[in-house]
């Protein structure tokens, strides 16, 4: 499976790349929304993990909206450590999954992928 991870934290990107590669998946990473969307233009991903809080003026919500507007078939799993609020709940209902941070182990990443 081809997977894209968009997160500004290098350690998180590395953790995902390690866990998902070990599980036999091809993994690309991006530090922010524009870089991730650029990768999505050239590569079909089956799953995109995107952090809600991203630098550079483009949030994970913006990335989610752009992916949906493009009409790609990618499943989108949102990631966040922030408390649940009305906006997050609305996006979580439309996303293909919600992964809560901090991530407590590789099993949590694989479980989110299989959900």
Image (cartoon, rainbow, N blue to C red):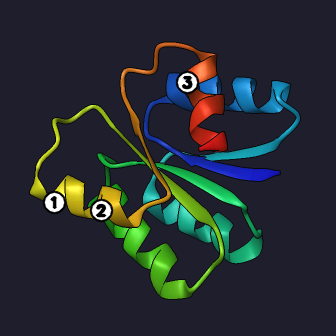
How many marks the image carries: the answer is 3
Q: 69 or 11: nearer the eye?
A: 69
**In terms of sequence position, does the residue under pointer 1 or pointer 3 come before the other?**
1
SS of the residue under disc 2: helix
Image height of 69 relative to 19, above or below: below
Image height of 66 relative to 26, above or below: below
The residue where tag 3 is placed is 108
- Place residue 25 in its image quadrant: top right
SS of the residue under disc 3: helix
Label 1 environment density (alpha carbons within 10 Å; few <14, some 14–19, many ≥20): few
The span from disc 1 to disc 3 (Cα, nearest Å) is: 24 Å
Q: Residue at x 46, y 52 (%)?
A: 32
Image height of 100 relative to 40, above or below: above
Q: 87 or 63: nearer the eye?
A: 87
Tell me, yes or no, if residue 58 can be seen here: no
The residue where tag 2 is placed is 91
Where in the figure is residue 80, as x and y percent of width and height?
32, 38
Where in the figure is residue 39, as x and y percent of width and height?
66, 65
The residue where tag 1 is placed is 87
Horizontally, residue 91 falls left or right of residue 87, namely right
Q: Residue at x 36, y 27 (%)?
A: 101
Label 2 environment density (alpha carbons within 10 Å; few <14, some 14–19, many ≥20): some
**In terms of sequence position, does the residue under pointer 3 or pointer 2 come before the other?**
2
């Amino acid at each position: 499976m081809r997977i894209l991870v968009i997160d500004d934290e290098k350690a998180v990107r590395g953790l995902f790349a390690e866990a998902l590669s070990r599980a036999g998946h091809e993994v690309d990473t991006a530090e922010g929304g524009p870089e991730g969307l650029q990768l999505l233009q050239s590569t079909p991903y089956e799953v995109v993990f995107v952090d809600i809080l991203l630098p550079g003026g483009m949030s994970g919500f913006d990335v989610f909206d752009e992916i949906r507007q493009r009409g790609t078939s990618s499943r989108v799993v949102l990631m966040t450590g922030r408390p649940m609020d009305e906006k997050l709940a609305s996006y979580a209902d439309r996303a293909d999954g919600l992964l809560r941070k901090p991530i407590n182990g590789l099993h949590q990443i694989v479980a989110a992928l299989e959900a």
